[in-house]
Image: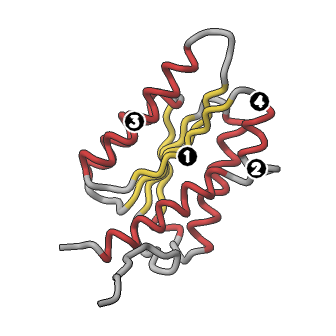
């Protein structure tokens, strides 16, 4: 008997996608958003199946993600933001709570929530991860969302 493997792909991307974007550190986050939208479109998602919801910052992302998930209109949500370490413990609180919050919504609503919230030590690292040396984490989050939508379609009961 052969082992059966089930995994998502990047071909079966059809669905509705919500992108929740924190405005704080917009100089980085807007590049993440561009990368996410471009990736969705390149994989066949039409613009009318993508909606962008803007919130003040990363800390507010989980609440918006939860409200969107409760609407049951989307097949996946992509969370984008940037938390850059400063000289106070504020970084730990915001990065930890935003990550924990989006993960909890995914589990509570049985819905893919791709975490594209950067948590970095410096502005240089943020820039590197938003489209230069280290790729675009917004595009990577969109790919994750596409793959999970495809996988969950295969796992429907």
* 76 to 83, vertically: above or below: below
The percent coordinates of residue 102 (x first, y second) are 40, 40
First in sequence, mark 3 or 1: give its number.
3
* Callout 3 touching callout 2 (CB < 8 Å): no
Q: Label 2: how many residues lie within 10 Å, few (<14), some (14-19) or many (20+)?
A: few
**Left or right position of 138 against 115:** right
First in sequence, mark 1 or 4: give its number.
1
Residue on which disc 3 sits: 62
First in sequence, mark 2 or 4: give its number.
4
Q: CA distance from mark 3 to mark 1?
A: 12 Å
Residue at the far front in the pictured view:
1
Residue at the far bottom in the pictured view:
1
Q: CA distance from mark 1 to mark 4?
A: 16 Å
First in sequence, mark 3 or 2: give its number.
3
Name the quadrant containing residue 153: bottom left
Q: CA distance from mark 3 to mark 2?
A: 25 Å
Residue on which disc 1 sits: 116
Q: Which of the two discs, 2 and 1, sits closer to the camera? A: 2
* 49 to 53, vertically: above or below: below
* 139 to 1, vertically: above or below: above
First in sequence, mark 3 or 4: give its number.
3
Report helix, strand or loop for mark 2: loop
Residue on which disc 2 sits: 134
Q: CA distance from mark 2 to mark 4?
A: 13 Å
């Amino acid at each position: 008997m052969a082992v059966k493997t089930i995994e998502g792909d990047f071909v079966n991307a059809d669905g509705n996608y919500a992108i929740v974007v924190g405005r704080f550190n917009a100089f980085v986050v807007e590049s993440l958003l561009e990368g996410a939208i471009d990736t969705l479109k390149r994989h066949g998602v039409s613009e009318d199946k993508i909606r962008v919801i803007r919130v003040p910052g990363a800390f507010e992302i989980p609440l918006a993600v939860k409200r969107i998930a409760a609407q049951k209109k989307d097949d996946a949500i992509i969370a984008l933001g940037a938390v850059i370490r400063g000289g106070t413990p504020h970084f730990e609180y915001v990065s930890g709570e935003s990550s924990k919050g989006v993960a909890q919504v995914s589990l509570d609503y049985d819905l893919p929530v791709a975490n594209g919230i950067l948590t970095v030590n410096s502005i240089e690292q943020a820039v590197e991860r938003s489209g230069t040396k280290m790729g675009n984490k917004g595009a990577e989050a969109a790919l994750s969302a596409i793959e999970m939508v495809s996988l969950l379609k295969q796992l429907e009961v």
